[in-house]
Image: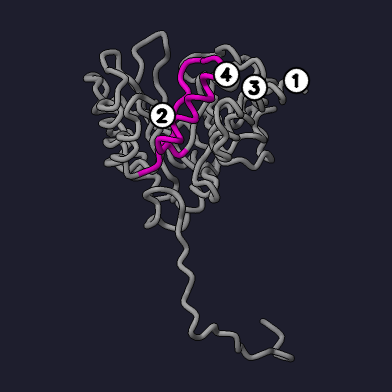
Amino acid sequence: MADLDGLREGHNYGIGVNVVSQHFPVKGAENLPWGMKDRLSRIFNMKTGRTVMLAFDHGFIMGPTSGLERIDLTILPLIEYADCLMCTRGILRAVVPPMTNKPICLRSDAGTSLLTSLNDNVLIDIEDAVRLNVSAMAVMLAIGEAEHEAKTVANLYKAVDAGTRYGIPVMGVTAVGKDMARDARYFGLASRIAAENGANIVKTYYCEGFEKVVAACPVPIVIAGGKKLPELEALELCYKAVNDGAAGVDMGRNVFQSEAPVAMLQAVKAVVHDNMSPNQAFELFNELKSR
C-alpha cells in the first residue's frame, strides 16, 4: 500500500486540452490490438514506417548455401545493423544469441526441399512461436500453383487465426510458380490474396508497375531481394521499391553474399530509412568496405 503521509491530491487534469490521438505508422494496423502493434513497432522503425529485415532462412530448403555455411561467422556480425531477423527456429535456438534483442520474423512453415516438389508445406505449432517470443510469423503462399495453392492459403489463414489469438502478426510470403509471370498483375493478385486472408505484412518481389501492387494492398509490403545482384543494382532495387511505396526490404543473398556484407547492409539501411540515392549509398558502401 502507498504511504498516505504526504499524499498529494491530484490537480493537473489538463482540463480544456484535447487528448492527443496516437497515430500508428504501419499501414493497415491502426485498429489492431495492443500486442500486435507492439510487435509491429519492433519490426518497423516508428519514425520512417519502414524496415530492413535480414533474411537467412534459406537453409530450410537449400541447406548450407553460399554465405550461410557458418551462420555464426557470416550472419552474427550483421545482426546489429538489421531492424529484424528472419530465420528458422532451429537456427534461432542454435546460433542466434538471445541477448541480441532483435525482433524475429520466424519462418513458420516447412516440409519440402529443392530436391523435391517445393511448397508442400505444413505449419509449425503456434506455441513454439510464443515460446520463442517472436515478433512475426512468415508463411509462404503459392498463388497460381494448382498443386499447392489451396494448401498454402489454408496454412496462411490458420496461421492468422493462431496469431490473432496470441497477438503475433503474420507475414505472407508470395512464392512464384513455374508458370507465373513476374509482373504487377500476378504480384498484385498474390499480395491482395495474402492480405485478404489476414496477413499483416506481405513479402513479394519488385516489378514494373509496382506502385499498383502497393496501392491495392491494404497492409505493408516488403520486397524480397531475390537472386544476388551487383551491389549498385541491389541498391537501385531498394530505392525504386521504397520510392514506389514499399515499406522496406527483406534481403538475404544481396547482403550475406556481398563482397562486404556489413557495409552492404548499412548502405541498404541508408536507402530505406534515410532516402539516400543508390549512387550515394554505393559510395557509402565503398567507404565502409575500405575501412
78 up-or-down from 30: above or below: above
Q: Secondary structure at mark 1?
A: helix
Instruction: Name the outermost residue toward the left.
Output: 146
Residue in front for this viewpoint, 117 or 50: 50
In this figure, which residue is indicated by the disc labeled 4? 231
The amino acid at mark 4 is Glu
Q: Earlier in the sequence, mark 2 or mark 3?
A: 2
In this figure, which residue is indicated by the disc labeled 1? 290
Decide: few, some or many residues near mark 3? Use Cα within 10 Å; few <14, some 14-19, many ≥20. many
**Closer mark to the observer between disc 4 and disc 2:** 4
**Closer mark to the observer between disc 1 and disc 2:** 1
Q: Is residue 138 left or right of residue 282?
A: left
Residue at the (43%, 44%) spot, across then down:
169
Decide: few, some or many residues near mark 2? Use Cα within 10 Å; few <14, some 14-19, many ≥20. many
Q: Is residue 113 left or right of residue 261?
A: left
Residue in front for this viewpoint, 243 or 104: 243
- Are the residues at dot 3 and dot 4 in contact (C-beta closer than 8 Å)? no
In 3D space, how far apart are the residues under numbered discs 1 and 2 (Cα atoms)? 40 Å
Residue at the (39%, 26%) spot, across then down:
206
Highlighted range, magenta: 219-247
- Are the residues at dot 2 and dot 3 in contact (C-beta closer than 8 Å)? no
In 3D space, how far apart are the residues under numbered discs 1 and 4 (Cα atoms)? 15 Å
The amino acid at mark 3 is Pro
In this figure, which residue is indicated by the disc labeled 3? 261
In this figure, which residue is indicated by the disc labeled 2? 109
Decide: few, some or many residues near mark 4? Use Cα within 10 Å; few <14, some 14-19, many ≥20. many
Q: Earlier in the sequence, mark 4 or mark 2?
A: 2
